[in-house]
Image: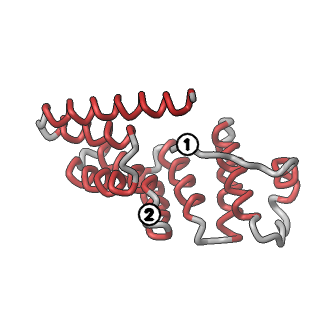
């Protein structure tokens, strides 16, 4: 599932000016900060994105999306232990969210812990059975575990799901 960013007009400039001071007293500023962080990450401004996510967590330490995105940043920088800590916290705070589980699975797979990666991918897939990415991940696990026929079936299902998603977007 894609992420929809709905930003208030001028939010990026407002938060850049107020980031290091007393942020805001509004009720959803932590959400706006997280959205700005996602936008900055998408734009390749990772240091600024990190500051936004950290500011969001100062306002609401239970904001799972900020933890998950800090994990993504850490993972991209090769800081797997930090990434895993953020993913675990995101998953603890929002157990229904498949993203932190998938992200943990990706690190575990990179580390060669295929069995634990599979458990994380399966748990994420149970929360989001429409995910072509998770079907692809499960196919990779099956392939690495020597289950070629299952891997092919997973990859084919992932392609079918991705094609169906593309058609829905086109409509």
The residue tagged 1 is 2
**Residue 86: mark in rendering:** none
Quadrant the C terminus occupies: top right
Position of residue 97 in the picture relative to residue 139 (left or right): right
Relative to 132, say whether 29 is above or below: below
Q: Position of residue 4 (x, y in %)?
A: 64, 46
**The quarter of the displayed image where residue 91 is located:** bottom left
- Which residue is at a point 57% across and 58% down the rendered structure image? 65
49 and 29: which one is in front? 29
Marks 2 and 1, how far apart in space? Answer: 16 Å
Q: Position of residue 117 (x, y in %)?
A: 28, 50
- Which residue is at a point 25% across and 50% down the rendered structure image? 118
The residue tagged 2 is 96
Q: Position of residue 123 (x, y in %)?
A: 32, 57
How many badges with numbers are in the image? 2
Position of residue 6 in the picture relative to residue 143 (left or right): right
């Amino acid at each position: 599932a894609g992420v929809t960013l709905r930003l208030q007009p001028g939010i990026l400039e407002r938060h850049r000016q107020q980031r290091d001071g007393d942020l805001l007293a509004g009720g959803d500023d932590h959400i706006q900060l997280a959205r700005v962080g996602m936008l900055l990450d998408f734009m390749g401004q990772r240091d600024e994105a990190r500051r936004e996510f950290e500011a969001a967590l100062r306002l609401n330490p239970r904001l799972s999306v900020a933890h998950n995105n800090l994990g993504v940043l850490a993972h991209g920088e090769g800081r797997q232990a930090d990434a895993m800590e953020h993913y675990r916290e995101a998953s603890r705070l929002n157990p229904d969210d498949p993203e932190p589980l998938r992200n943990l699975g990706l690190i575990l797979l990179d580390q060669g812990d295929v069995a634990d990666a599979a458990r994380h991918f399966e748990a994420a897939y149970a929360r989001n059975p429409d995910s072509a990415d998770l079907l692809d991940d499960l196919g990779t696990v099956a392939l690495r575990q020597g289950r070629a026929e299952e891997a092919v079936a997973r990859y084919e299902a992932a392609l079918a799901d991705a094609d169906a998603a593309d058609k829905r977007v086109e409509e």
